[in-house]
Image: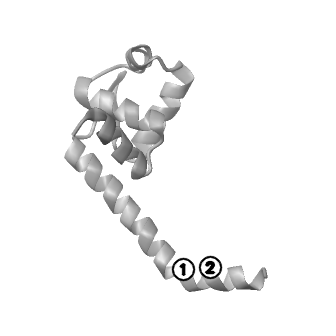
Amino acid sequence: MSLERVIEALIGLGLSGVDAEVYVYLAKKEPQTALDLARALNITKQKMYTSLKNLQTKGLVTKEQTLFFALHFEEALGILIKTKKKQAQSMHENKEELLASWKTKE
């Protein structure tokens, strides 16, 4: 699987394009500082810090002092799939309520 396909899959599992690129780069080249990542990916520092924060919140990236580390791809994939399944289950459980809300708007 090419890295482009991996990035597309990560986007499909809920990451933004920037977050997916940052995660993949970090997973391949870790550890890195935020500044090194921003330079390597040609992303502004502000976007990089936002992306790293997003990835940390999802549990895909950790920080030790000034260095960022990516969770192993298999584990990250598992987390993202589990999150997506929970979202789908929640939508399924709320389906009738959503349909009722839709019908009352007509």
Residue 76 placement (x, y as % from top left)? 28, 47
In screen coordinates, is 80 left or right of 16?
left
Residue 89 placement (x, y as % from top left)? 42, 74
Residue 81 placement (x, y as % from top left)? 32, 58
Q: Secondary structure at mark 1?
A: loop
Is residue 54 at least partly visible in the picture?
yes
Is residue 69 at least partly visible in the picture?
no
Do labels 2 and 1 touch, CB within 8 Å? yes
Q: What's the distance in space between the residues labelled 2 and 1, CA to CA?
A: 6 Å
Q: Which mark is residue 98?
A: 2
| Residue at figure coordinates x 40%, y 40% from the top left | 56
| Residue at figure coordinates x 46%, y 16% from the top left | 42
What residue sits right under mark 1 in the picture? 94
Residue 78 placement (x, y as % from top left)? 26, 55
Q: Secondary structure at mark 2?
A: helix
Compared with 32, 86 (above or below) is below
For the N terminus, the image quarter is top left
Q: Which one is in front, 54 or 5?
A: 5
Q: Which one is in front, 12 or 83?
A: 12
In screen coordinates, is 76 left or right of 98?
left
